[in-house]
Amino acid sequence: MLKAYEEELSLASLALRRRNYAACFAHLERAHVLGQRLTLRHTHVHWLMLVAAWQRRDYREVTGQLPRMVASMLFSRLWIPVGNTGRSRVSAFKPMPVPEDLRHLVS
């Protein structure tokens, strides 16, 4: 799982450097699904989403990531909505389907 998580972060970083925000967020969403139960990794993904949103000048996403960062620090070990992508456009409490290729890593 950690290898897949790191790979998604690497791809997100590359996409961000290329200003390909759609690809960046797609990889960060996948990293979020993988890292949700691990407090530091979960919070790190929200930080990277905040950074990408700031660079994109998507202030709605920036505003949504701030409380998610705090919540990730407090609740990652207690309860998570499995499969949630971590973006501001979806409820922070909504479980979502886990991508098929990640299911075996998120059990």
Image (cartoon, helix red, strand yellow):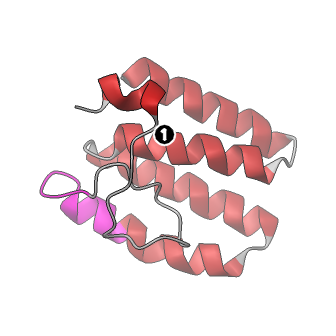
Residue under pointer 1:
31
Would you say 45 lies left or right of 48 here? left
Give the percent coordinates (x, y) of residue 96: 38, 55
Please report the bounds of the magenta region as a residue range: 70-80
Report if residue 74 lies within the magenta region: yes
Residue reaching furthest to the top:
3
Give the percent coordinates (x, y) of residue 91: 41, 73
Foreground of the two, 4 or 100? 100
Would you say 73 lies left or right of 47 here? left
Count of marks overlaid on the render: 1
Residue drawn where x is 46% and y is 25% of the image: 101
Viewport quadrant of the C terminus: top left
Residue drawn where x is 46% and y is 59% of the image: 86
Residue reaching furthest to the right:
18
Q: Secondary structure at mark 1?
A: helix
Give the percent coordinates (x, y) of residue 17: 82, 41
Amino acid carrying label 1: it is: Ala
Give the percent coordinates (x, y) of residue 70: 34, 70
| Above or below, 77 relative to 98 | below
Quadrant of the rendered image containing residue 62: bottom right
Quadrant of the rendered image containing residue 98: top left
